[in-house]
Amino acid sequence: MSLFLAVLLSVSASSCGRTKISPNPYPSGEVIIEVTSEEEEEEEYTGKKRKIIIDTDTGADDCSAIILAAKNPNVEILGVTTMVGNVGLEQSNNNALMALEIAGCDAPVHEGSDQRFGGKRIEAASVFGDDGMGDADLIHPKGEIQGNDGVNFIIDMVNQYPGEVEIVSLGPATNIAKAIYRAPDTMKNVKMIWSMGTTGYGPGDASPVAEFNVYNDVQAYRELVSSGVPLTIIGLDMCDGEAMWTNEQFEELEELNDTGKFVAESFGKLRLFYAKNGSEKATMNCDSLAMMCVLHPRFIKSTSKVHASCIVENGETYGQVIFYRQGFTYDQVSNDYDYNVTLVTDVAKGKYFEMYKEAISK
């Protein structure tokens, strides 16, 4: 058994987590991280619980990530903030409430934005089905949202816990950009924003060069990458290849327990979408992979410090995020940048599914 799985198995289940955490949850610079001893691994799980906010447009992949975080004993979910993206705002709220209930977590849900950072209404677009959850009649939450201003909730939490709050951004950056705009000095006290966004160094899904979350609110993403708030990006290129979940693995989830069945069924429509696009045997689940990076630092094998530039002008490259690597000499481009972003460049893709399955088995 790997040390990853041993650590997961050693932790008991709880409502949104109850025990230990990593004091240094993200690497910096172009580094390879390896576990060399059981003692070294144990050092990661000492200290107080990390405080996270999950910002989401709540499709099936978001829900699977929320469940993963809620099952982890090393974090406290301060709240979930929603927005339009994969689904409309009411559906986004209900999906988030249902995911938390499935995981046995009582974290509050706060309704966020249905308009882009620039003010234009966001139109929901989903390959997960009309409800964002495979149209499998999974969403019947008993709880209710706690408030209708997710942006102010983010600001309030950062004010209450300066230097402690980590925000996991699983959808468009709308809520976060608005928080930065409303309270720039406060948001400088965010410990880290983790963004599942951009294509990384690979191809896009919203367009050949753009990723869905960025494309849905490009102005917001530009605000995010230029804000100077500590930012780690996990792009689409981290969830391809070995990280994709196979049909057999979805069957394993269905047979695992009720939580696994919920996750597997919610991906039904997305799996059909992938099959129509030539990937009949495997499907990406990027949001849970991004959450795995947040929760398990040693899942990240390497990172790079970069300057991120977001293309907001209309045209074929709209929504593309270009990364300039620190220390790399370009023939025609100046290197006079602020290298303000940590880009994840390699993860333990082959361990992803087994780690996820072990986490939700508790």
Image: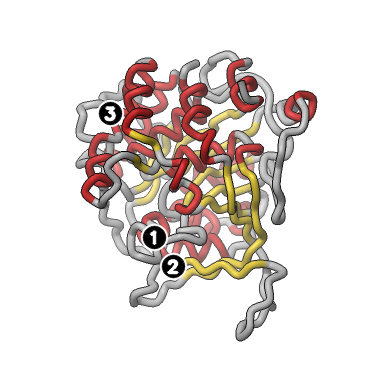
Residue 59 in picture, x, y percent from top left: 33, 40
How busy is the neighbourhood of tag 1: few (under 14 within 10 Å), some, or many (20 plus)? Answer: many
- As drawn, the label of residue 320 is 2
CA gap, disc 1 to disc 2? 8 Å
Say whether residue 185 is visible: no
Whether residue 14 is visible here, answered yes or no, is: yes
Disc 1 marks which amino acid?
Gly
Secondary element at tag 2: loop
Residue located at (50% from left, 16% from top) = 362
Give residue 39's quadrant in the image: top right
Residue toward you, 13 or 163: 13
Q: Name the amino acid, label 3.
A: Glu
Asked whether the beta carbons under mark 1 and mark 2 sit within 8 Å of each other, the answer is yes
Q: Which residue is drawn at 71% across and 27% down?
A: 45
Q: In this view, does 227 lie above or below 154?
A: below
Q: Position of residue 244 (x, y in %)?
A: 41, 41
Q: How crowded is mark 3: few (under 14 residues within 10 Å), some or many (20 or more)?
A: many
Disc 3 target residue = 265
Residue drawn at 51 percent across, 43 percent down: 290
In the structure shown, which secondary structural element does the residue marked by tag 3 occupy? helix
| Among numbered discs 1 and 3, the one appearing first in the sequence | 1
Q: Calculate the distance from the C-alpha at mark 3 to the C-alpha at mark 2.
A: 32 Å
| Left or right for 276, reference 219 | left
| Residue with the mark numbered 1 | 204
The residue closer to the viewer here, 194 or 204, is 204
Give the x, y percent position of residue 338.
68, 69
| Mark 2, other Cα within 10 Å: few <14 / some 14–19 / many ≥20 | many
